[in-house]
Amino acid sequence: MENDVVCGMVVNEKKTKFHSTYQGKDFYFCSNHCKTTFDKAPQKYAGK
């Protein structure tokens, strides 16, 4: 399980369809809204 870095929700990375890669690291999201928010400013969330 992974944490959505935007909202903090626990996400099953094997089941979610919302995923981004930033600087070689994979990030998983609970919703398209969180993925879109991350994709607009990944540097803001990637360090969490």
Image (cartoon, helix red, strand yellow):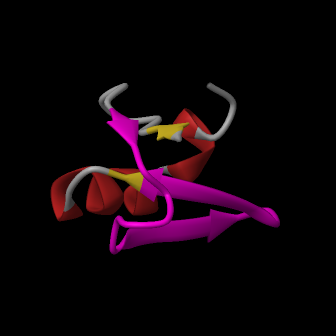
**Count of marks, rendered view:** 0
Q: Which residue is drawn at 53% across and 40% down?
A: 2
Taking the magenta stretch, the answer to whether it contains residue 25 is yes
In the rendered view, tell whether residue 7 sits above or below residue 41.
Answer: above
Residue 35 pos. (x, y %): 33, 59
Q: Give the side of residue 27 with respect to residue 7, left or right.
A: right
Q: Residue at x 35, y 65 (%)?
A: 16
Residue 22 pos. (x, y %): 68, 63
Taking the magenta stretch, the answer to whether it contains residue 29 is no
Q: Give the range drawn in magenta.
A: 10-28
Residue 42 pos. (x, y %): 54, 51
Residue at the extreme right: 24
Q: Which residue is drawn at 37% across and 66% down?
A: 15
Viewer-proximal residue, 15 or 48? Answer: 15
Q: Residue at x 43, y 62 (%)?
A: 39
In the rendered view, tell whether residue 33 sits above or below residue 19.
Answer: above
Residue 33 pos. (x, y %): 17, 56
Quick one: quadrant of the C terminus? top right
**Residue 32 position by quadrant:** bottom left
Viewer-proximal residue, 28 or 24? Answer: 28
Q: Give the side of residue 47 with respect to residue 27, left or right.
A: right
Q: Give the side of residue 42 with respect to residue 46, left or right.
A: left
Viewer-proximal residue, 43 or 4? Answer: 4
